[in-house]
Image: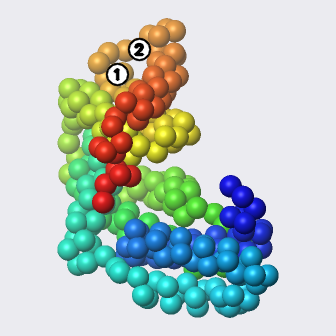
Amino acid sequence: MSETEILLPRNQDYYDRLAAYVTDAIGVDGVAADSTLAEIHQDLLQAQHDGIGAADYFGRDPQAIGDEIVANLPHRSRRGWVVLGIVAWAVCFALAGWRAIILDPARVPLGSLAVLALLLPLAILVVTAFHRRRTFTRKKVRSSFLTILLAVQLVLLPLTDAFPRFGVVAVPAWFSVAAGFGFAALLCGFAIWLGLHSWVFAVIVAVLATLFAYPAADALGTLPGWWGRLLIPLLVVGLTLLIRGGDWLLPAKWQAKDRS
């Protein structure tokens, strides 16, 4: 990358904050947002080449610029919101259900989990909106994904443990085995389909898949001695190699990034 394609630190910080503010807007079409931001990046490069800083080119109130950009971008349709809501509920229900199965398979509160699966997405939207509002005031631009992950781990998950438990059922071992290995396979397949060609991403997904696969393996029987202690690192390494190998072998035309 040549020097003419690199923004100066102050201009890059302006762009990063503007981009974060736009992409974190709830309901905005992601593809359209990325396309618009790419054009803005090129405009800033040209302005920088002409000796004009980002703040002078776009204005010293980037939040107003961001609001204008978001207002002119296409937004998710009502049908899109319905589909997203169903998917979000299903994902939250599955993840919370798996956590409950790991903790106590004999007492899984399906009723409580169904209600929590409605509340957790709403809480995530609130956290995202709060994080976005502070885009131009915080010292560093941080990923909203990491903020949401921390909020879920440190605040929301402990609150779920205090939620009233109802609709309690016992989950058989065979279901734990099928669900654990099934979720792990779905995660790995999804990572391969994304085709990001990243070792870091592969390791992160492999760790998440291991959180499903290890309890499933344990449900098959006790994991004694050295084998039980080695299974977790073996799963992480093996699944990482599986994801990277599948990513490399899968034809590019079948991967998500090449789909219109």
Q: Secondary structure at mark 2?
A: loop
**What crowding class fits label 1: few (fewer than 14 Cα within 10 Å), some (14-19), or many (20 or more)?**
some
Indicate whether 145 appears above or below 74: above
Toward the viewer: 121 or 58? 58
Toward the viewer: 39 or 101? 39
Residue underneath mark 2: 223
Q: Are marks 1 and 2 in contact (CB under 8 Å)?
A: yes
Q: Secondary structure at mark 1?
A: helix
Q: Which mark is residue 20?
A: none
Side of 61 relative to 35 (left or right): right
Residue underneath mark 1: 217
* Tag nearer the camera, 1 or 2: 1
Toward the viewer: 171 or 49? 49
Image quadrant occupied by the N terminus:
bottom right
Q: How many marks?
A: 2
Residue 46 position within the rendered picture, expressed as x and y whole percent measured from the top left: 67, 77
User: Can the viewer see residue 216 in this picture?
Assistant: yes
Indicate whether 199 appears above or below 238: below
Toward the viewer: 207 or 199? 199
Indicate whether 51 appears above or below 193: below
Residue 127 position within the rendered picture, expressed as x and y whole percent measured from the top left: 50, 70
Q: CA distance from mark 1 to mark 2?
A: 8 Å
**What crowding class fits label 2: few (fewer than 14 Cα within 10 Å), some (14-19), or many (20 or more)?**
some
In the picture, residue 125 is in which quadrant?
Answer: bottom left
In the picture, residue 175 is in which quadrant?
Answer: top left
Side of 17 relative to 128 (left or right): right
Image quadrant occupied by the C terminus:
bottom left
* Dot 1 or dot 2, earlier in sequence: 1
* Kind of residue indicated by mark 2: Leu
Residue at 20% across, 26% down: 174
Residue at 51% across, 15% down: 230
